[in-house]
Structure formats: structure tokens, C-alpha cells
Image (cartoon, grey):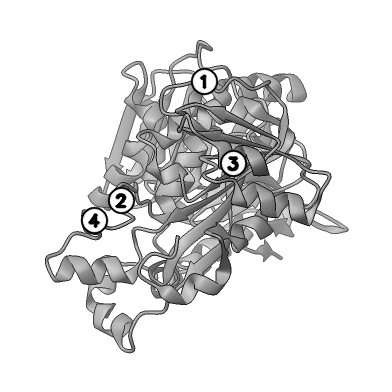
Amino acid sequence: MTGPFPGFAEEYYKNVDLRVVQAVPAEARSILDIDCGEGYLGEVLKHLNPERHVSGITRRTEHSEASARLDRVIVADLDHDEPNLAKGSFDCIVADNVLARYRDPCAVLKRLRPLLRSGGRIVASLPNLQHWSFYERLLRGELPWQENDALANTRFLSAPGLVRLFLDAGFLPLIVDRRSVEPPTGWHEAMRPAIERQRLDPAIFAARSRTWQYIVTARAIDGLPDATATTRPVTFGACTNDADVLRENLLASPCLQDAMHQTLMVEGAASAAEGLNAVIDQAQHELVVLAHQDVYLPEWWVAKLWQQYELARRLTGDRVGVMGVYGIRGSPQGVDRFGRVADRDFLLDEPMPLPAGVESLDELVLIIPRGGGARFDPALGFHLYGTDICLSAVNAGREAIVIDAPCHHNSKQGDQLPAAFERSRRNLGEKWASRLPVATPCCIII
């Protein structure tokens, strides 16, 4: 996919993206090429390792050229057809600039997921809707692509969009490479007022706007409940101060669309405690999910939550005080991190087994069993209340647990902590002086 930038030509061989080839795991032996075309990608993969067995899927009934280069070619339209391939038969599935051309890429990924062996990977390249050249076209009153462009039938995705696509399909996505084209001199400076108006982090915006194409590897999420699995309702709650962020993230989460769940949004709270305690007081269901407004929860997330809650109850002897999706545990040897979260464009995929007991939880998602007596302290403001609720749970004879329930944290902000964080850090240190040092996701309080 060279698009409008001919400088990419040296990165291709017979229309094969060599960066995609590099992203295929070296140990992969059985590979499936989606929309394999004339079979050149598979030919390159077999050239790098003759022991590889490469199959291809094509929508065309005539595929003699691909058949001459690949070990097997089958005809299937993944928008409609289940591929006639054995489950668990591939180490790697490659979608080189084709996934975004399907009518329903998420459904396609769901069809492909069972074909991967345990630990297998999907490798995909996808064009980026946030590239600066598309802003330029829109400002001139043009479509981002013309009807006669090679890209005209492509479903463009932003970085958050591609992360959510893979999560909804049951994969943990990792952006491993970016094909970048820098904007003209002065372009970012000219965009500065718009960046400030949207309260975007300039560094994040710059990285996304120079990216023409993302190259992603993704592995299937372990233990994903079956699509037909029954689940129970939960209460969702959040403190909100930005209607656009809330609408585009938490309220866009597919699992929140089910009418059986209760949704409570508290706007303009003076502290996290004011808003989240109000949610707990009004909650109607056994589990209360307290999320940041910029968190997106995939469609299977509630079923996964209940699965993990039952595991956590058995692990703790039914002494779960609070759960989260990312947490920290300190020890004399250092700090161990637990959890799996897509954090903006990055993947936090810690190797520690889950569920697991921790010392502190990140506040992006906290889950409280209703009736357990958990209360948030207004002295913590909007920071470190996840650490405080964990310490309070342990003090009451309960445990803080990280569960395996991945989500997307689509924060607009950078990594710099606001001035209010220091006040929260000081208040937490004074409250729990007898328990110091305490490891938190942001720092160690001594």
C-alpha cells in the first residue's frame, strides 16, 4: 500500500510489504495469508524459511498464480463465509492491507480467531485516518480519498479505532511498527490552537498525525467466554467532566448497550469520592464497575468480569474487597505489575498470572462488590483513591485483586502528573503512615 507517497516503494517487493513480513514471528511455521492475491507474500515468507507451510484465502475463483506459489489456496469471502480450515491449525495469520477492506472487519477477525493455535498471532497492516494528509484534504473541502483512489474501498481506522476493533474481536493488539510521513514544516504549529481546544497531548497528536500506516500483531485473549454464555447485570458508574470524551469512550462501549445493566454518571463531582460513593449508594446490582470516562469496554467484557470474579472469590476464600484491571505489588525485590490493558496506543501485557492479589490498583477501572462496605475518601481528590481503597479493603480483612478483563484506556492526556497529585500523595502518606512504603501505579510513597 504505497498510497500517495512514492517514497515507500523501496519497502515493497512485488507489492509485498516488507515491514509486515518482518512482523511475522520467526518461529511461525504454519501461516495463513488473507486475500492472498497472486501469492507473493507467502512466497517471500517461504523464501525466508522453506520449512514454512503457507495457505492462502482468496475471494476469486481463479487463483492459479497463487496456487503456484503457496502450499494451498481456498476460495472464501470472509465477510460471509466460514473458512473451511481446521481450528487451531495456524501459528500466524497475515492480513496485509486487506482487513480494512472488508464490510465488517470485526466479524472477519472473529471468524479467524479459532484458526490460531494457542499463542498464535495475527499480523495486520491498517491505514490511519488521523494522518495529516487527510486533515489537509478535508480543509480543502475534499474527501479524504477520491472515488478512483486505490484507497476508495478502504475502511480507515484511527489508533483508538484499531485497538477497539481487535479487542471487540477477542484479541490483544500491539502496534509494532508505523510507516510515517512527516507533515510540512510548521504544520503542527498551525494546528496548535485546535490541539489546545481539544485538550490533546501534543506529543501523542504528533505521533498519530505523522503515521500513515500501523502494523499490528495481536494474540487471542485467553479464556474468553463463549458468545452464547449467559451473564448477569452490573452497575456502571463514572465521574464525568467532558461530555464528548464520555460519549466517544465509556458510553460507546458495546457492553453498556444492554438494557439489563444500570448506568449512573455523576457530573461535576468535587472529588472522586463524592461521585463514586453516590454510585455505590444507588447501585442495584451485586458488582459495581467504576470506570474513567475515557475507558472503552469490549462487547464480551461483562461476561469476562463475572468469570474472573468467581475465580477471585475462590482464590481469596470469598474475601474480595475490590478488583481492578491493572495493579502493583511491592516486595523487597522490587515492584511486580499485573494486568492487561490497551493504554492509548500501547499494550500493557504483564506476564504475571491472573487473578492475583495486589497492593494497589489503577483507578481506570475499579470493581466493588456491593454490600462490602467499601467507601472512597474525599481527601484523596481525584488521585490515588485506588490505592486507598485497596489499603482500606486489606484493613477490613478483604483483598484487592487484579482480574484478567482487558479494556482500552483512551486518555487524551500525557504522562505528566498534575499539581493536585502531590496533595493526594501527601494525604495518602499521612493516612497510611504505618503502612509505608506503599507502591502505587504512579510512584512509591515512602
Mark 3 or mark 2, which has the lower sequence index? 3
Mark 2 or mark 4, which has the lower sequence index? 4
Image location (x, y in percent) of residue 97: 47, 51
Given residues 257 and 159, the one toward you in this image is 159
Q: Which residue is mark 1?
A: 82
Please identify the quarter of the rendering in which residue 79 is found.
top left
Q: Which residue is mark 3?
A: 66
**Residue 374 in sight from this viewpoint:** no
Asked if the residue under mark 1 is in contact with the one under mark 2, i.e. CB atoms within 8 Å, the reply is no
Q: Residue furthest bottom?
A: 185
Alpha carbon of mark 3 to alpha carbon of mark 4: how far? 26 Å
Residue 126 numbered mark, or none: none
SS of the residue under disc 2: helix
Q: Which residue is mark 4?
A: 148
Residue 372 lies left or right of residue 159; in this view the side is right
**Residue 345 in sight from this viewpoint:** yes
Image location (x, y in percent) of residue 260: 35, 15
Graded by Cα atoms within 10 Å as few (under 14), some (14 to 19) or many (20 or more), the crowding at tag 4 reads: few
Q: Which residue is mark 2?
A: 245
Please identify the quarter of the rendering in which residue 104 is found.
top left
SS of the residue under disc 3: helix
Mark 1 or mark 3, which has the lower sequence index? 3
Q: Quadrant of the C terminus?
A: bottom right
Alpha carbon of mark 2 to alpha carbon of mark 1: how far? 37 Å
Image location (x, y in percent) of residue 217: 61, 49
